[in-house]
Image (cartoon, rainbow, N blue to C red):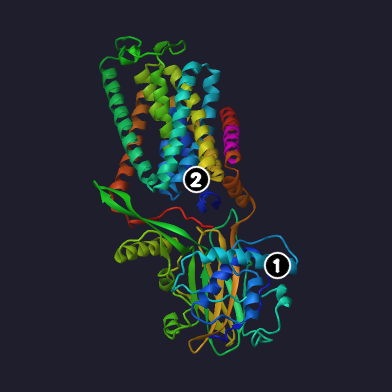
Amino acid sequence: MRELRVALILKLPSPACGGGVGVLRRRRGRDARSPPPSPSVADYRATSPASGGGRRNKKGMSAGVGAIAALLLCLVAAAAAAQRVERPGQSLPAPSLGGPADSSVPPSVPSAPTVPELIVDLSQARVSITSAFQGESLLLFGMFDPPGEIVVVVQGPPARETVMRKERFLGLWLNTGRQAFDDVPAYYFIAASAPLQRLLARGAGGEILSLEDRLSSIRPVRWRSTEELAKFRGGLVEVKRREDLYPAAFGQVTVQAGRLFRAELPFPSRLPEGVYDVRAYLLREGRIVAAVSRPLPVGKVGFNAQLAGWSRQAGTLYGLGAIVMALTLGWLGGAVMRRL
Amino acid sequence: MEIYLPIAEQSMNVFVLFALGGAAGLLAGMFGVGGGFLATPLLIFVGIPPTVAVASQANQVVANSISSLQVQWRRGNVDLRMGLVLLFGGMLGSSAGVWLFTYLKRIGQIDFVIAVMYVVMLSSIGLLMLIESLLTYFRRRRNPTGPRGKLHTHYLVHRLPWKMRFYKSKLYISAFLPIALGFVIGILSAILGVGGGFVLVPAMIYLLGMPTTVVIGTSNFQILFVAANVTFLQAATNGTVDVVLALLLILGGVVGAPIGSRIAAKLPGVVLRGLMAVLVLAVAIQLLFELLRTPVSPFSLGVREVLP
């Protein structure tokens, strides 16, 4: 698994330095279990665009400036990350990235294949929440060098979620217990070309985490007894299931002609915004031989985005606008309807 | 037809929302009170987060009350002096209410408080109205003309300090009571997203002893500004006003209100009040049932916080 080959197929416009934290955290996770990768690979990772977890930087930058900025940001992030509590058990796989900035990659990347073993693309570059949005199903498709099995893991951006529990109090049901967890993925979906239990049982290098494994690493903000925490964790899954954010069923990766594959990624209508992380793995005999990661931005667009933005950033103006709208419509409506 | 609501962050059927606004407008037209007390629980029932439902409904109340106020003002049915005194209390109350709302939201008890307050308020108002209209109905049947009583009875209100003259209402009472009344209505308005007309109107008649002709206009005057204040503060502090949702409710209300007033013109006042009492009680019982029933799942999620 150490000779994990990096498939460089991503096409990102320019180095986005905002993702430095995410990249770095993943490296730390890896480093905890293994000797550090060769300097060239490390350099490459530090300067490459983020695969998710960070904010996107829309402004295009020249590759050189971008690389320097990314390095600087990563240094700052390293200082910040050093203060964080190390999380054993949560070891996200190393991102494999690429793009136009690849010309800066030194030729010393270990055994970089001329033809990648795994190529993945999505039917859409982003999930756009428009006024007609009712949830969406994206198609993930790609090609791999047989033999092998494909596993796809889609993860929403992590955040703090507070689980509340109702209890009967004087005959009334009210929220009496609450428990917050950090690092809870907004969305989690796994699809595989073969029964996942079989693939995971062979131990896919500990990188592909089932939902249960992934959730075992979320951090409770306040400690309780283990049983209580397990109950709240169960409640979290229950609510997320209900909203289809943790789809209960594993998705199916369909393989055609032995080398083409496709999978449906279902996104429900109550979809939190952020940059999602779509990862595809090629497994041979239970070992990951190739991995590809793609960021998938999910966000409101157009009118919806504008309204939500105003509401968040200019609440006072938004409120005044809402009042003016109500006054105008109420006045006009009243006048018109009375004439009829 | 579904539409995505940008602040509620979910899609909803346009016609359901339009119909809800229409029902609220119908009530406003029929009974002269905003239909917020019915629309807000229904919005929550169809799955809008309570915080968004309350704040957006307050926005609808603004539209609702300006259309009624238009007519009332022209007919001279607004006691401006009383309205301003009520409004003074209302502004204080609604500001305090939004602050309380924000606090309750933070500790995760807002949904419960909204439900309990609705139950307590609707059931007491509903019962009072039902008893009153039944009594009036039977008394009138026994004695159709009825003895003409005093304009209003004198009790505690008339002994408090800060007495003010309200010419239009033919009252000489302490300003303390209207201010306190406005304050309470303001809190209700902020936490429940209602105009508060269904509390304010009976209180003005029975508590302040105002003549019925100026009650509707004056309450509309106070509600307009209080609802505007709630909308503004909710948008500024909690960001929970969904203008797309409010727009649909307003459009429904604009259509529903004239239909309601046409129905009201054909029914006698006692019957109208009795009908409204039954409706209010029905909503209260439904909400109470929701509180007592064992929930499908005891778990729910609070606000998702993306940490920097």
Task: Please name the amino acid that badge 2 sits on.
Answer: Leu
Task: Please name the amino acid that badge 1 sits on.
Answer: Ile
| Quadrant of the drawing holding the C terminus of chain A | top right
Q: Residue at x 49, y 35 (%)?
A: B230
Residue A333 x %, y %: 58, 33
Graded by Cα atoms within 10 Å as few (under 14), some (14 to 19) or many (20 or more), the crowding at tag 1 reads some
A298 left or right of B289?
right
Q: Which residue is mark 1?
A: A68
Q: Quadrant of residue B158?
A: top left
A198 left or right of B144?
right
Q: Nearer the viewer, residue B257 or B207?
A: B207
Separation (CA) of disc 1 from disc 2: 52 Å
Q: Nearer the viewer, residue A258 or A334?
A: A258
The stretch in magenta equals A318-329
Residue A328: within the magenta? yes
Q: Can residue B132 be seen?
A: yes
Name the mark on residue B17.
Answer: 2
Graded by Cα atoms within 10 Å as few (under 14), some (14 to 19) or many (20 or more), the crowding at tag 2 reads many
**Number of dots carrying numbers:** 2
Looking at the image, residue B26 lies above or below residue A230: above
Q: Quadrant of residue B140?
A: top left
Q: Nearer the viewer, residue B288 or B87?
A: B87
Residue B290: within the magenta? no
The nearer-to-camera label among 1 and 2 is 1
Please state the chain letter of the residue tagged with numbered disc 1 in the rendered image: A
Looking at the image, residue A3 lies above or below residue B108: below
Q: Residue at x 63, y 63 (%)?
A: A18
Looking at the image, residue A126 lies above or below residue B188: below
